[in-house]
Image (cartoon, rainbow, N blue to C red):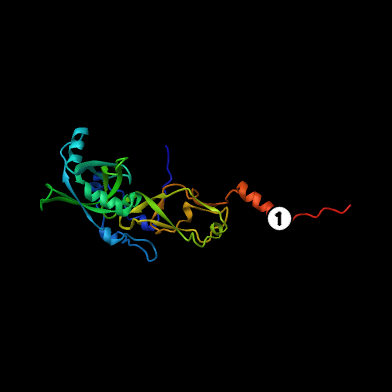
Amino acid sequence: MLLRRATALPKTLQNLRLFSPAATSALALDHSLETQLDYLPGFPRPDPKHAETILAVPRSDSGKNISAKERKAGRVPSIIFEQEDGQHGGNKRLVSVQTNQIRKLVTHLGYSFFLARLFDVEVRSEIGSEEVIEKVRALPRSIHLHSGTDAPLNVTFIRAPPGTLLKVDIPLVFIGDDVSPGLKKGASLNTIKRTVKFLCPAEIIPPYIEVDLSLLDVGQKLVAGDLKVHPALKLVRPKDEPVVKIAGGRVSDQQKDQQKKDQPKKEQPKK
């Protein structure tokens, strides 16, 4: 018999679960026992000015011709998946969202920041109707933009009800570069990663993670395990993966010539 050792989750994650229709029907969780999670002081939290409800309408069919028709009408073909293992989904609902609204959100937030933020998605019977078929909390999983115009071509969402865990690529924001000893010496900043994937409770997905460069000298680096995050977040990749490094700059030929000129000339011995 093959035995597998059980891996204990941190206490902050023990009352959370990966959501799926089968799991929901099989497990009746006592909500009074669930850990109440919230953003901690000093950590980034979503800006409320971007807390916008994305409006959607049902889409009965998929395919190239249907998608082209939707885009011509000013809508983006989209899918809302059920959460299963934190990344892939099932039980999909075909919808279309408004092109102008998605373009505005991506422009204001930025591509990677848009994919790290929860939205309310309100599915209505038709554009302009007040009849709400469904309202869900969802995370944009992927978005495909036109290579020439950056117009959104399709968007995929994952349902994110309270108590779920989601794998999210969190954007990195670098601070302290103005006082970094290495950068002050003329070294260069080698940005190895711009996002890092974490397993996040839906209630506390950070909009970004600050990476402090203020103490880094030439040759020093920060790895994923050095990032300061909420204790309920769990790294998906190894902790020793490098994120950023202060790399020493190469001396150019022109700088070498200048250094030679600046060196004092040796006196010739008298004959």
Q: Position of residue 253 (x, y in %)?
A: 62, 46
Question: How busy is the neighbourhood of tag 1: few (under 14 within 10 Å), some, or many (20 plus)?
Answer: few
Instruction: Please tell me which residue lies in front, 205 or 209.
Output: 209
Q: Secondary structure at mark 1?
A: loop
Q: Is residue 170 left or right of residue 133?
A: right
- The answer to whether any part of residue 164 appears in the image is no
Residue at image location 65% in from the left, 49% down from the top: 257
Considering the image in quadrants, where does the N terminus appear? top left
Instruction: Place residue 68 in its image quadrant.
Output: top left
Residue at image location 27% in from the left, 58% down from the top: 50
Q: Is residue 140 above or below residue 32?
A: above
- The answer to whether any part of residue 31 appears in the image is yes
Q: Position of residue 169 (x, y in %)?
A: 37, 49
Residue at image location 20% in from the left, 46% down from the top: 97
Q: Position of residue 196 (x, y in %)?
A: 41, 50
Residue position marked by numbered label 1 in the rendering: 263
Q: Is residue 267 left or right of residue 88?
A: right
Tell me how many marks there are.
Answer: 1
Q: Is residue 95 above or below residue 223?
A: above
| Residue at the limit of the structure toward the front, as seen here | 271
| Residue at the limit of the structure toward the right, as seen here | 271
Look at label 1 and name its amino acid. Answer: Gln
